[in-house]
Every structure is written in structure tokens, then in C-alpha cells.
Image: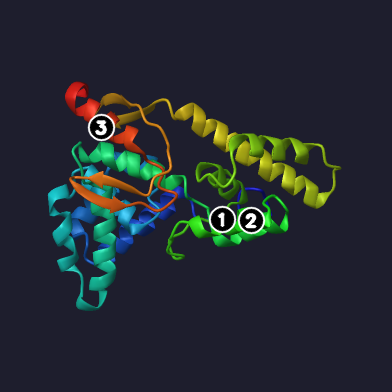
Amino acid sequence: MTADTMTSTPMTDQETSLRALSHLHANRLLTDAEHAQALAHADLAQRLLRTPAEALGWVAARGIVAPELLPGLSDRAAPERQDAAHRIVADAVAMVSGQAPAWVLFEISLMAARLEDGVTEAALARLGTLQLLEPAQLAQAGALLPAQDPEWAAPDSLAATLAWTVRTGVLNKPQLQALEAATRAEPAFAVSQERKDIAADALARVEAEGRQSGGTVLQAEGATKTVTMTWTSTTTTTIGGQARPWRPGKLIGLLVVAAIALYILFGR
């Protein structure tokens, strides 16, 4: 068992993306032609599309399906699959709806989704067993866990889950730094080494996210744009004039909205 994952032989990013696109095709949310166009798109090789909703959002962001047509796609699904199709379409619409190009909104939404990869109840419980989180912290974190469909969830990651507790305020960065220093000082034996690896990996993730929060470079049709954003905890955000709830792990704050507005005014 490693610090990063609690499962063996996970799917590759490409396999995961192809599976999500295939699900859309099998459920008629993509036609044969749209599916073929998606598979042939040069951007696909650079993507991790973990869920059907992410795949559908990407399809819209790349112009394979027009974003304005997304809400009606669930009508294509077979009657017995309508409820599931509606959920996929609604999540995809939320990823690309707003007062900015669909690709900008999609990139931001996808980055937020990747911050939740591997954050699971099982990983949280293991952190408690390893005494990397105290009982009160476990209870607080458990109430904030992101809702995920097990069929499409990332493998459990102890390090990602510990880093996530900092983003959600269960721990703060100095507490994680102190925890990492304490584990480094522990005697070398098996479970202690696992604790060291997890704490070090989690701290590296938090520090990397801090370095990246000042500016994110997004690619669009040969042009490079830099969108400045800050990750902050929020419970709701407004997209296209409609208030939408965000899960606790969706850490996109008001500065993202401001960044998009600046892009519209000055970036194009």
C-alpha cells in the first residue's frame, strides 16, 4: 500500500476518459458522429475526464456539441435512463455555463474536480487509524466529504484526503507542517514510514497548490491566456445569474468570477 492510493492497478487517464465518453455514447448522449469526433480530438490525449459529466462538459467546451444544446441532450436517452441522463447533463451544464467562453469555465471546473480526486470516506477513516487526524477532526471532515458516485470515483488517496482537509479548514497549513515534522522525527518502522510518506505528500500538494493559486495558464485554439484565481471555501456561487450550490470541495471563490470578468473585458 502506498501513501497515495489504497487500491491496485488503477485505470490510466486515457482509459478513464475513454470509458466516460463511451458511457455517453452508450446512453445516447453522444451520437456516433459526435463520439467519433471526440475520440479523434487532439486535446483528448491531454485530459483526465473521470466522469460522464466531465466528458460531456469537455465535449461542449471543445465545440463538438454546442453548449447551448446541452440541456436538451437528456431527451436522447432511453426512458429507463432518463433520470441518470438528466443528472449527467445538469452537472455538465454547470461546468460550462456562465459569462465567459465555455472552455474557460470548463478548465476552472475541471481543476476544482481534480482537487477532490481520491478524497473518500475510506481514506479519511484510514487517516484516523494512522492517527494523522484526531477524532474531532475526523468528524468535521466527514461532514464535508464531497459527494461522489463510486462507479466513477478516483482511487482512495490518503495524501490527497489529508491535503483536502487543509483546503476545507479542518486543518490549517501550520498544523499540517507540524504534523509532517512530527512524523519525520518518529522512529523508522513500517506504520511510521507510511505516516511519514502521507504527511510529506500531503504537505507537498498543499504547497504546490499555493504556488499555483497566483495564476493558471489556459490553452485555447493556439492562444495562451493566464487567469488569476484564488482557492477559497464557499458554499454557493452564481453562474449565469443562477445561484448554484457547490460541494465543500469545490473551492472556487469570488475572485474566479472577477478573473473571468477581466478576461472578457481585456483578454480577448
* Pointer 3 local density, CA inside 10 Å: few below 14, some 14–19, many at least 20: many
- Residue 140 is marked as 1
Asked whether, in this view, residue 264 is left or right of residue 209, the answer is: left
* Residue 8 seen by the camera: no
Reading the image, the residue beneath label 2 is 136
* Residue 151 spot, x, y in % from top left: 44, 65
* Pointer 2 local density, CA inside 10 Å: few below 14, some 14–19, many at least 20: few
- Residue 31 is marked as none
| Residue type (three-letter) at the residue carrying disc 3 | Ile
Disc on the earlier residue, 3 or 1: 1
Q: Are the residues at dot 2 and dot 1 in contact (C-beta closer than 8 Å)?
A: yes
* Pointer 1 local density, CA inside 10 Å: few below 14, some 14–19, many at least 20: some
**Of marks 3 and 1, the one in the foreground:** 1
Q: Secondary structure at mark 3?
A: helix
- Residue 260 is marked as 3
| Residue type (three-letter) at the residue carrying disc 1 | Gln
Q: Secondary structure at mark 2?
A: helix
Asked whether, in this view, residue 140 is left or right of residue 212, the answer is: right
* Residue 229 spot, x, y in % from top left: 37, 31
Q: Are the residues at dot 3 and dot 1 in contact (C-beta closer than 8 Å)?
A: no
Disc 3 to disc 1, C-alpha distance: 32 Å
* Residue 223 spot, x, y in % from top left: 25, 25
Q: Residue furthest front?
A: 136
| Residue type (three-letter) at the residue carrying disc 2 | Ala
188 or 2, nearer to the observer:
188
**Of marks 3 and 2, the one in the foreground:** 2
Q: Residue at x 20, y 77 (%)?
A: 79
